[in-house]
């Protein structure tokens, strides 16, 4: 197996709040960075999250980006960002994702709904979605409000089936304020 480390599927999963904190702190870091770093938002955000996840556990696998210098297993697969744990069947060389910890979509060019919809298919502890507030596809509703409502519906749907729903981190970058406006949407048991 390449440079991705494997966490035994029977190991304790990282605390969801730690994963959410890693995402939010990474967004704050990127928002404070100079314009040259923000020129490649996806790489800057993913690299910051990866660095924080490594502190949580060196056994969390991460894949993002398309750089040919990275092993194929560490490049983007299905989502802009994926953090996961792996396991294999004893005696076989193949490794498979046992649990997605974080999946993320980062969009700065429009067609937000299409990228956000990918997150509806994920079985992940945390899903994050990042976009600039300059994109206005759901007027008169604010994009942050729109996607927060969709995330709430997804959480209700998953929990109605008796499953643990993901936590959603939805962040809209404000060029005016030079920071991310972030919402964390989680299951609120009644």
Image (cartoon, helix red, strand yellow):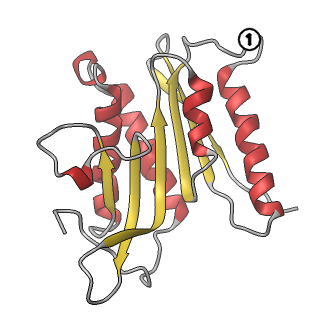
Q: Where on the picture, by quarter, is residue 188?
A: bottom right
Crowd band around label 1 with a 10 angstrom C-alpha radius: few (<14), some (14–19), many (20+): few
In this rendering, position of residue 134 left or right of residue 37: right
Find the residue positioned furthest to the bottom. Answer: 91
Percent x, y for residue 105? Answer: 48, 37
One can see residue 144 in this view: yes
Which residue is located at x 31 percent, y 72 percent?
95
From this view, report whether residue 174 is shown above or below residue 47. Answer: above
One can see residue 182 in this view: no
User: Please, what secondary structure does the residue beneath circle 1 have?
Assistant: loop
Quadrant location of the C terminus in the rendered image:
bottom right
In this rendering, position of residue 4 left or right of residue 8: left
Of 53 and 155, the residue lying toward us? 155
Percent x, y for residue 107? Answer: 47, 26
Which residue is located at x 61 percent, y 46 percent?
168
Of 93 and 176, the residue lying toward us? 93
Which residue is located at x 33 percent, y 75 percent?
7
Kindly identify which residue carries mark 1: 139
Find the residue positioned furthest to the right. Answer: 190
From this view, report whether residue 74 is shown above or below residue 38. Answer: below
Percent x, y for residue 124? Answer: 55, 58
In this rendering, position of residue 6 left or right of residue 172: left
In this rendering, position of residue 188 left or right of residue 151: right
Quadrant location of the N terminus in the rendered image:
bottom left
Which residue is located at x 55 percent, y 54 percent?
126
Find the residue positioned furthest to the left. Answer: 69
Instruction: Please tell me how many numbered marks the rendered image carries.
Output: 1
From this view, report whether residue 100 is shown above or below residue 74. Answer: below
């Amino acid at each position: 197996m390449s440079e991705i480390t494997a966490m035994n599927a029977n190991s304790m999963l990282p605390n969801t709040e730690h994963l959410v904190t890693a995402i939010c702190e990474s967004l704050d870091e990127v928002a404070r960075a100079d314009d040259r770093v923000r020129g490649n938002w996806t790489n800057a955000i993913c690299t910051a999250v990866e660095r924080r996840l490594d502190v949580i556990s060196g056994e969390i696998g991460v894949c993002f980006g398309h750089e040919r210098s990275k092993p194929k297993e560490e490049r983007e697969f299905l989502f802009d960002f994926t953090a996961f744990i792996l396991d294999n069947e004893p005696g076989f060389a193949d490794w498979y994702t046992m649990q997605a910890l974080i999946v993320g979509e980062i969009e700065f060019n429009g067609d937000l709904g299409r990228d956000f919809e990918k997150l509806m298919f994920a079985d992940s502890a945390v899903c994050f979605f990042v976009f600039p507030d300059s994109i206005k596809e759901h007027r008169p509703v604010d994009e942050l409000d729109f996607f927060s409502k969709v995330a709430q519906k997804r959480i209700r749907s998953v929990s109605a089936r008796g499953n643990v729903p993901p936590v959603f981190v939805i962040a809209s970058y404000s060029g005016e304020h030079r920071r991310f406006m972030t919402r964390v949407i989680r299951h609120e048991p009644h």
